[in-house]
């Protein structure tokens, strides 16, 4: 499993240096920095023997660039579940680990700014949202702590050799299925705002499922059959 850490607007040199060390400790494959707000040379002072890792970090101007060519995109947030907010239907770190165990070829973990975290627009790029449960009186972790906890959990999964896993539906497969579901939702619901919220829910469900290729083909067949029936004019329209 290939792991990419994506830091959005990282503000502190100490945090960046410590995160580089953590990435090297736990074998994170890539480090992407989206519009970093700190000095990388200063961060080198805190990277210790991971200076080479930090020096190889990829700096980009947009999330789109940071998320190319990954199978699963995971946003992280201290603010978890919120009733009625489709973007805040979060998983715990333990639940996320269960998904990873089902088989993921590549994953991007998004971490936000120390001061404000990820924006709603940035969270919307993710396939799932994960939060780390902590003391309700002070649940906000330092970003370097959060990175360490995620990478430790992934490290444990990577060390376990899992056999007999069926081929999984690819990201392209699921995105194609989402297009069909959107068309179906537009025909059945019609109201744009509701359709958009429904699609966020479907996106989360599909990417959490880690469905097999065979399951994907069956659901795609079922969705197309329904759409074909809806596309045909009814006798009442003739």
Image (spheres, rainbow, N blue to C red):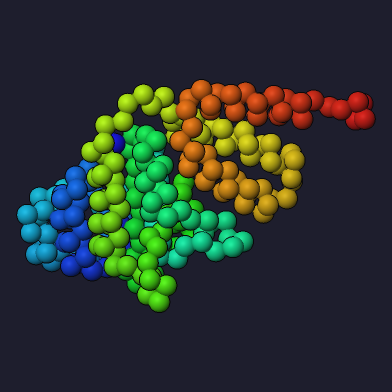
Closer to us: 216 or 137? 137
User: Going by the picture, which residue comes out furthest to the bottom?
Assistant: 137
Taking the image as shown, residue 54 lies to the left or right of residue 200, namely left
Q: Position of residue 26 (x, y in %)?
A: 19, 48
Residue sitting at x 15%, y 56%: 21
Closer to us: 156 or 79? 156
Image quadrant of residue 136? bottom left
Residue sitting at x 59%, y 63%: 83
Res 90 seen here: yes
Q: Position of residue 18 (x, y in %)?
A: 17, 61
Taking the image as shown, residue 34 lies to the left or right of residue 28, namely right
Q: Position of residue 9 (x, y in %)?
A: 32, 62
Taking the image as shown, residue 100 lies to the left or right of residue 20, namely right
Q: Position of residue 230 (x, y in %)?
A: 77, 30
Taking the image as shown, residue 101 lies to the left or right of residue 196, namely left
Total count of labels: 0
Residue sitting at x 30%, y 53%: 150
Residue sitting at x 21%, y 62%: 16
Above-or-below relation of 111 to 196: below
Closer to us: 66 or 166? 166
User: Where is the C terminus found, in terms of image quarters?
Assistant: top right
User: Where is the N terminus found, in terms of image quarters?
Assistant: top left
Above-or-below relation of 106 to 23: above
Image quadrant of residue 183? top right
């Amino acid at each position: 499993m290939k792991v990419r850490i994506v830091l959005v607007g990282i503000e502190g040199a100490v945090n960046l240096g410590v995160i580089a060390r953590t990435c090297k400790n736990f074998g994170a494959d890539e480090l992407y920095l989206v519009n970093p707000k700190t000095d990388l040379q200063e961060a080198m002072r805190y990277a210790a023997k991971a200076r080479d890792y930090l020096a190889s970090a990829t700096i980009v101007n947009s999330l789109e660039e940071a998320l190319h060519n990954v199978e699963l995109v995971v946003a992280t947030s201290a603010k978890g579940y919120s009733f009625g907010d489709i973007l805040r239907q979060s998983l715990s770190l333990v639940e996320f680990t269960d998904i990873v165990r089902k088989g993921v070829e590549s994953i991007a973990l998004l971490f936000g700014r120390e001061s404000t975290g990820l924006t709603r627009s940035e969270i919307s790029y993710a396939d799932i949202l994960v939060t780390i449960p902590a003391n309700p009186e002070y649940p906000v972790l330092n970003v370097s702590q959060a990175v360490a906890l995620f990478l430790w959990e992934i490290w444990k999964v990577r060390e376990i050799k899992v056999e007999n896993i069926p081929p999984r539906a690819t990201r392209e497969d699921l995105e194609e299925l989402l297009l069909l579901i959107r068309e179906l939702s537009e025909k059945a619901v019609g109201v744009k705002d509701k359709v958009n919220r429904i699609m966020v829910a479907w996106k989360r469900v599909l990417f959490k499922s880690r469905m097999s290729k065979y399951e994907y083909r069956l659901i795609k067949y079922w969705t197309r059959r329904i759409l074909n029936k809806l596309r045909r004019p009814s006798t009442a329209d003739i």
